[in-house]
Amino acid sequence: MSGTVIGRGVQIAALREGLERGRLVTVTGAAGVGKSRLAAEAAPACGEPWRTAIRVRCPDTAPTVPGTLTALLAQAVTGSRPAPEERADLDALTERIVRGLAAPGPSSTRALLIDDADAVHAECAGLVQRLLMAVPGVRVLVTSRRALGLGDERVVRLGPLAEPDAVRLLLARVREYGGEFEPSEGELAEVARVCRLLDGVPLAVELAAAHLRRGMSVRAVAERLERDRCWLTAPGARLRRHRSLRAALGAGYLLSDGPVRAVWSRASVFVGAFTEATAVYLCSGAGTTAEQVPACLARLAAEGVLETVGDPGGVRPPRYRMARAARDFGAERLRHAGETPVARERHLLHYRRLAEVAGNLWSEGEQRQAAELVRDNREDLTALIRQALVPDAPAEHVRAALATVVDLWFWWAVHEHGEEGREQLGLLLPRYAPDDRLAARARWLAAWLHAPGDPAAVRALLDRAWPAAVLAGDDALVGWIAHVQGVLAWEQGDAGTAAECFRQAAGAVPAYAPGGPSAAVSLAALAVVQAGTAPAAARRSARRALAWPGVRDDAWAVAVGHWARAYVEHRQGRGERAWRRARRALAVLDRTGEVPGLALQGLLTAIESGDQTCVFVPPPRGEHTGRPRLVSPC
């Protein structure tokens, strides 16, 4: 593939600096990021001795026999091919290379470019080390997926192109071979989508451009890439590994040993970032021990198959994410090995347990940790739910997905992802046949997420959830259903019914009940309803909310209680006291960093402006009644 990779100015500058200051520079990066091209561009521009550097291209196939690189380099340095009997004596061949490099004369070359050293990685490291020690003036530039690991080595690691640069590269390649290509605004958005799906890898972008030159539409390429990225091909490429994205990835796969291949294919079931411990659980077995998995992950990260997420040297354990093309390739190998069902089953079991842990952490007061756990694993939790929506998904997978959504109630209701939660419940509930306690809790959660704004859907859901809750003796669920009924009554202007529902909810939900909001939330809602008609009762309800058992470990319930009490004070004309209470609540939220405080901020604004009518965040879908929102006040 000819031409210059666009947007590599910084990387070329870093490589040139390394070539000027160091004797050994290795250009590393994942398959297809343009290591060979960058080295070929940067080295001659550095002047002597790189203008006369000897270039050796190593085989790009499976691991080669020992001595392959030494023989190639001896031939390049001396100009004559070693005889078969000479190839067996590697020490003699090495001495021949040293003499050739050290020979005096103006035409002598003391710079070597060893291109694509993956297939001879171990031999390359040993040979380069000997040459650097034996010939003080020699300089070596190596391209490889991973560094050689030598002491004086300078490593320039290439990454993918930024989206604007990838878009320019794709358009340039299409125009280069196919004439004018001026995409419309819609087509340009699809071009950007193609580059995002390809993670900005230059080889993949150029392969996509080849399909566009052959008449395939941009939308068709993008839709095909959504399903699989390894189908991209360019049969006319000079190097075999550049003829398809599958071949480029497969070259590294063939050079890996068995455990590394197994970890690569099994880790392809992860959609987002994952920890080392999770990979050990999912990737070990069938010839790969748990002790081998961390080293395999490090090897894959060094070769660009995995990227390290976050700060590798930080306090938190390292997390990895697999590149999308590498994930598609690994999924192919997993299917070929017949291990896909087992890997997906382990994936489901792990993330089902993770959702349970997150729900327990929230109930036990570790709300920051619970939210971080969901946030870090959100993509794979979503993948678990999507797997249950395929037509032939087993019933136990549907149950696991529904239980996961219910366990994450706080993520949907408190952390303002209600639309996503509603959508997932709406898809899963029709697929779940039993009319049991899980279905009842799922319908309650769906009703809560629909209220306010869709009273008909809320009533239909509660009408089915109520009998199951009563028959199961689930007092907490009975209370939560009453809370949602109170929300409906309040939105319809029936303050008396709303107050009674919230009072019943607070009396029904046991202290420390997991899986839903504390009774303190219902008491706070009761205080808001009473604020306009029974000020003394409203103050008592707000105080009870903040004194409820376990409420001090529930940052969200504390915020709701302070919100309600500040609102009551504000409605009674005690603006300064209300302002101070709202500020204290916001300070608590700032320290925990977890529970959103938009309603408290809205209340502060209203207090400062003297507005006592419209002080809260409006309900979803834009309906604003002038009453405080009770579904999720914060």
Image (cartoon, helix red, strand yellow):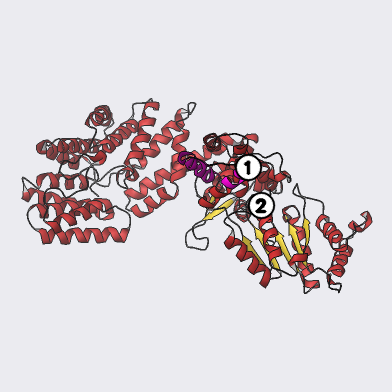
On the image, the x and y values in percent for residue 66 come to 82, 55
Q: Is there any visible trace of residue 523 in the rendered image?
A: yes
Near-viewer residue (362 or 118): 118
What residue type is disc 2 on?
Gly
On the image, the x and y values in percent for residue 305 come to 60, 50
Residue 185 among those drawn in magenta: yes
On the image, the x and y values in percent for residue 283 come to 58, 45
Residue 117: which disc?
A: none
Near-viewer residue (378 or 296): 378
Q: Is residue 413 above or below residue 398?
A: below
Find out whether the residues at labels 1 and 2 contact each other: C-beta distance under 8 Å: no
On the image, the x and y values in percent for residue 191 come to 52, 42
The residue shown at (35%, 54%) is 368
Q: Does residue 306 appear left or right of residue 489 in this picture?
A: right
Near-viewer residue (439 or 199): 199
What residue type is disc 1 on?
Leu
Q: Earlier in the sequence, mark 1 or mark 2?
A: 2
Question: Foreground mark, 1 or 2?
Answer: 2
Residues in magenta? 171-198
The residue shown at (19%, 58%) is 582
Q: Does residue 445 appear left or right of residue 611 in this picture?
A: right
Asked where in the image residue 77 lies, by quadrant, the reply is bottom right
Asked where in the image residue 285 lies, by quadrant, the reply is top right
Residue 207: which disc?
A: 1
Report which residue position mark 2 lands on.
3
The residue furthest front is: 180
Q: Does residue 99 appear left or right of residue 368 in this picture?
A: right
**What secondary structure prevails in the magenta region?**
helix
Near-viewer residue (145 or 285): 145
The answer for how far apart the CA atoms under marks 1 and 2 are is 14 Å
Q: Does residue 329 appear left or right of residue 142 in this picture?
A: left
Element on which disc 2 rests: loop
